[in-house]
Amino acid sequence: MDFPLESYIGAGPLKLLAGKDAFTALLGPPDRTRKRPSGEQLSWNADIFVKFTAHESADGPVATEIYFGPDCTTVSWQGMPVFGDPKAFLEQIVPADPAPLHGLGILLLRGLGIAMTGFVENHREDLSIGLFVKGHWDNDLDGMTPYSPRG
């Protein structure tokens, strides 16, 4: 299954704001789940992680974040494989965001609706890329600073 990333929409057939049943229909039953005291429901299918939370647009929990790990080799952005050459990918995606932020190991591209880990530090074992719904990170920017690639 291919997962082309679309800002604020989803990745291929996996759509933000879809319910758990839609993900189960596409990916099968999750390998692991966890419910946080906040009500967030976390779901893992191999190298795909989804966070389901209450959202004003739905009656039940919906996907507000979808993340992919480096073993999910069919993830792409604008035709470029995300995990093939992480350094080259980072060099391509950062200029597309008007105000990238970095902190706590996270590169946040709010203009694209994308969060990434492991790319700036070049740590393959920490690589992940995810999509989130608009406004999701708006209240969690403590410790984030403007990101500028090292020259």
Image (cartoon, rainbow, N blue to C red):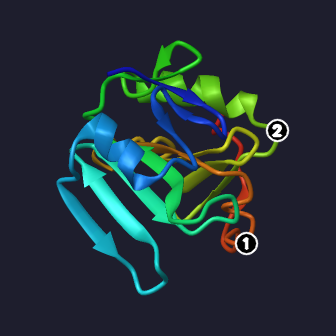
Query: What is the three-letter code of the residue carrying label 2?
Result: Pro
Quarter of the picture containing the C terminus is top right
Residue 36 visible: yes
Instruction: Give coordinates of residue 6: x percent, y percent.
Output: 61, 29
Mark 1 is surrounded, within 10 Å at the Cα level, by few (under 14), some (14 to 19) or many (20 or more) other residues, namely few
Residue drawn at x 56%, y 45% as measured from the top left: 16
Q: Which residue is mark 1?
A: 139
Residue drawn at x 59%, y 17% as measured from the top left: 78
Q: Residue furthest bottom?
A: 37
Height in image: 2 above or below 67?
Answer: above
Height in image: 107 above or below 139?
Answer: above
Task: Determine which quarter of the picture holds residue 59.
Answer: bottom right
Q: Residue furthest top?
A: 79
Residue drawn at x 42%, y 87% as measured from the top left: 37
Instruction: Give coordinates of residue 62: x percent, y percent.
Output: 52, 57
Q: Is residue 151 left or right of residue 4?
A: right
Quarter of the picture containing the N terminus is top left
Q: Could you say which disc has been placed on residue 62 in the image?
A: none
Q: Secondary structure at mark 1?
A: loop
Query: What is the three-letter code of the residue carrying label 1?
Result: Asn
Q: Toward the viewer: 111 or 127?
A: 111
Height in image: 94 above or below 66?
Answer: above
Q: Is residue 72 left or right of residue 29?
A: right
Mark 2 is surrounded, within 10 Å at the Cα level, by few (under 14), some (14 to 19) or many (20 or more) other residues, namely few
Residue 123 visible: no
Q: How many marks?
A: 2
Q: Is residue 52 left or right of residue 127?
A: right
Instruction: Give coordinates of residue 48: x percent, y percent.
Output: 32, 44
Q: CA distance from mark 1 to mark 2?
A: 19 Å
Q: Secondary structure at mark 2?
A: loop
Q: Which residue is mark 2?
A: 98
Instruction: Give coordinates of residue 12: x percent, y percent.
Output: 48, 26
